[in-house]
Amino acid sequence: MHLYGTQSVNNLGHLTIGGVDAVELATTYGTPLLVYDIALFRQRAKAFKETFKQAGIKAQVAYASKAFSSIAIYEVAKQMNLSLDVVSGGELYTAVMADFPREKIHFHGNNKSFEELQYAFDEKIGCIVIDNFLEIELIKEISEARQQSMNVLLRVTPGVNASTHDYITTGQEDSKFGFDLKNGQADDAFLKLFNHPYITVLGMHCHIGSQIFETAAFRLAAEALMEKMVEWRKKFKFVCPVLNLGGGFGIRYTSEDKPLPPSDYVQEMENVVLSMTREHNYPLPEIWIEPGRSLVGDAGTTLYKTGSTKTVPGTRTYVAVDGGMSDNIRPALYGAKYTAVSAGKMMDPHLDKVTIAGKCCESGDKLIEDTYLAEPVEGDIVAVFCTGAYTYSMASNYNRLPKPAIVFCEDGEHQLIVRRETYEDIIKLDIPLQKTDSGKLS
Ligand SMILES: Cc1ncc(COP(=O)(O)O)c(C=O)c1O
Ligand SMILES: N[C@@H](CCCC[NH3+])C(=O)O
């Protein structure tokens, strides 16, 4: 059984997270419950920052908050001196509500609206990562109309095919994101902005995908961008002060995943940048990275309560829990794999082979196929590990299931940071039909 971060087992045989009994948490807050081990988040953040410090490289570590966005996690990110990657007006609004330092906010997105861009200008954020030609025009229009300056990075696709799920690779040429590095798009984009009175191009950005294990993909991407930077210096006498190499560092969901320590990926990037800047006598740029999953993924654990059990003789036993694809779409969407334990029976042998099913009206709503629990009976608390990234942020109200509550745990303390949705929340946007004489709409 693999435990993460501060997880342990207490003398009652219960799983503990951040020194707090998981079964007690389930009783106090109800289930499904997403529990974050905040010490693990802090440890990961510190490790990333330390890697740059040791190499003597100026850096920004931006939490890619699409992985999990809430006011409280932004507050922890602020405490840890992280920067923040937001990808929509909604994430930016959450950051503003957390009073995140605006100059450390980076705004992403392949189709930012005029209103979202104006909001970014209103808040005077640190940087907009420009993704396409329309956005260039919109940003020029806004900055000129307001006579307001803005820092930008150009998102480029370096043509690197990282081996991960097709849906989450982003650095290949055939991608909806960014300007192609090889076919001249990136140069065109740069020239449209270079020497603009209000817009400062800080440099380039790339992100090659998510849940990547091989260092080679990061190396190739860094090399491709460095080569372009050297070319731009030669052609346009432009020196990039910033190189943003994105996120994507893989984590261990199951024993099949063999990630390196997150800082190893960063060191690979650092080595490329250090050696190529030396080789070309290029001023060392600041390196920015954007880890999401590797900061919050294994810090999150979802607690469910088991309900009905069904055995298909000779085939399998389904154990249904009180959540499912509505709070974790990843198994259904990507075939993502997870591990689970019986959180109240940690000392008991986990020998019962079961498929953990969700409660949504969908055959594909299976959280884990063929896993092992300790003699499951109704009312057990099952903990599914590594659910901190892209679960709550991708959650839905499918079947009108209320979204779970979220709790932070640290040093034996726990705090509710997102309350559970209620049925009232579920219908809060509904507008009943207006009464007319005919009973029809008019
Ligand atoms: C531009 C960008 N940066 C950072 C991330 C974070 O990726 P990850 O959560 O895999 O670290 C993503 C998501 O893939 C992204 O699209
Ligand atoms: N949502 C994906 C990752 C997408 C990353 C964002 N570009 C996942 O769950 O793995």
Image (cartoon, rainbow, N blue to C red):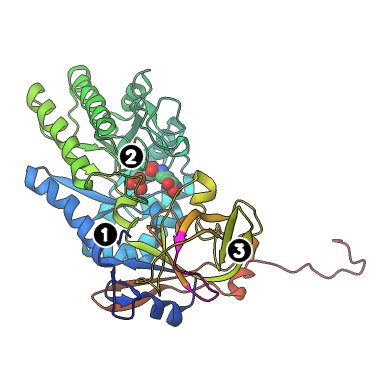
The circle on residue 212 is 2
Q: Does the stretch in magenta take in 374?
A: yes
How many numbered markers are drawn? 3
Residue mark closest to the camera, 1 vs 2: 2
Q: Does the stretch in magenta take in 154?
A: no
Q: Quadrant of residue 35?
A: bottom left
> N-terminal of the two: label 2 or label 3?
2
Q: Please tell me whether mark 2 sits on a helix, a strand or a loop.
A: loop
Instruction: Specify the segment rendered in magenta.
Output: 372-380
The residue that label 1 is drawn on is 101
Q: Residues within 10 Å of mark 2 (few under 14, many from 20)?
A: many
Q: Please tell me whether mark 1 sits on a helix, a strand or a loop.
A: loop
Residue 415 in the image, given as x and y percentages of width and height = 35, 77
The Cα–Cα distance between marks 3 and 1, rounded to whole angstroms, is 41 Å
Comparing 425 with 410, the one in front is 410
Residue mark closest to the camera, 3 vs 1: 3
Residue type, mark 1 in image: Pro
At horizontal 50% and vertical 70% (from top left) the residue drawn is 376
Q: Residues within 10 Å of mark 3 (few under 14, many from 20)?
A: many
Callouts 2 and 3 close, C-beta under 8 Å: no
Q: Quadrant of residue 346?
A: bottom left
Residue 214 shows in the view = yes
Residue type, mark 2 in image: Ile
Q: Is residue 278 left or right of residue 21?
A: left
Vertical arrangement, residue 290 with respect to residue 404, above or below:
above
Tell which residue pokes out farthest to the right in this image: 438
The residue that label 3 is drawn on is 359
Comparing 21 with 439, the one in front is 21
Comparing 156 with 350, the one in front is 350
Q: Is mark 2 within 8 Å of ligand 1?
A: yes
> N-terminal of the two: label 1 or label 2?
1
